[in-house]
Amino acid sequence: MTWQHDYSERIMKSAALPSAELVRGEGAYVWDSEGTKYLDFLSGIAVNSLGHAHPVLVEAVSRQIATLAHVSNYFATPPQLELAERLRRLSGAGERGRVYFANSGAEAIEAAIKLARRTGRPRILSLQNSFHGRTMGALSLTGKASLREAFEPLLPNVSHLESTIEALEKAMGPDVAALIVEPIKGEAGVIDLPAGYLAAAREITASHGALLIIDEIQTGAGRTGEWFGFQHDGIVPDAIVAAKGIGGGVPIGALVTFGEASDLLIAGQHGSTFGGNPLVTAASNAVLGEIERAGLVENAARRGEELNAAIAGLPLVDEVRGKGLLIGVGLSSPVASAVVTEAAARGLIINAPNDSSIRLAPPLIIGDAEVAEFIEKFASALLASASKGTS
């Protein structure tokens, strides 16, 4: 009996068969059940901000689970209150800000949809080629028809726009509750928004009385070289959605509201049994605290520049996208899957969101050694893929 057989027999067939069975990790590395060591430049899809088995996270979770793991939302706990204040501070929401805790990014998006509905307006705008999650509400916002079609009909009154100011201006009206947008489209291949889009979107939504909600699930927690992706543009949104990296591997999501949007949801209109429990909020406090203490936001910006410069001259590379340590590599040929396979054979974990794009999202802790190892292995994988493509 192999793990592949066990997986095929026991796990729902909603995902492809995994490429390996991972059994442990340390820092930026993981090992599979056959003892193979990999440099992890995906971080569980931008989740493991501190890498694997970081002592700060291990200690925080161990201490909290030995004290108080779960109490339901009938009670407050110190870690929950501490994390809410930390998120208000790091996001810039300030004293008018409020935090709703969920268990994942998709759940936090669902809370954002309810927030938008509380405006009394029916329509929500999203962008084409966007990704906001796989629950029915989040999927309704996701701008990929291939993901939505099997589950339609979904939420009504959702429009998926081209990523242009002209399209937004044309779609905007008194019936629009909110625009929900990713600062960088991660699942599309790490695609940047057009320059100035978020600033213009802020002006347009504000002038029409609509909410601007930023999906920071993949771009938050310092990954782009700022605490949150929208901060590169110097705007103030009405709400942000965070998850993934804020937990460092522990499942958590959050909706953070700014200003008047903080008054839209009232008692009894939303809730979660596990959302914001002391175990996950203690973990998130530890992760965000270590990112801040160790200067990892700045490290993400610096290492991202190094990687961008090194990658740009490699074979098959057509363009390098993204910010900080969320990097998209556009390939000149549709061989992304082959590059991922060649990389894995060399002990490197990366991801192919589509046929011509590679996504990189390494832990924020990477240093000189990990950058050098990545460049060597990635260049080799690209060369191997290029030679096979021309043979």
Image (tube, rainbow, N blue to C red):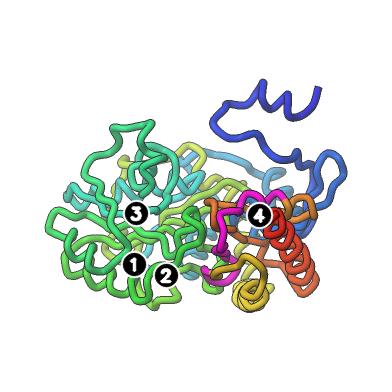
* Residue type at numbered disc 3: Gln
Q: Which residue is mark 3?
A: 128
Query: Magenta segment, which residues?
Result: 321-341
Cα–Cα gap, marks 3 and 4: 31 Å
Residue 381 x/y as whole percent: 73, 59
- Report helix, strand or loop for mark 2: helix
Is residue 225 shown left or right of residue 74? Answer: right
What separation in Å lies between label 1 and label 4 (alpha carbons)? 45 Å
Report, in whole angstroms, how far the alpha carbon at label 1 lies from the one at label 3.
Answer: 20 Å
**Residue 183's spot in the image, x, y percent?**
42, 65
Residue 237: mark = 1
Q: Nearer the viewer, mark 1 or mark 2?
A: 2
Q: Which residue is mark 4?
A: 389
Tell me, yes or no, if residue 180 can be seen here.
Answer: yes
Give the image location of residue 103, x and y in percent: 51, 44
Residues tagged 2 and 4 counted as in contact (Cβ below 8 A): no
Q: Secondary structure at mark 3?
A: loop
Of residues 378 and 366, the one nearer the viewer is: 378
Q: Amino acid at mark 2?
A: Phe
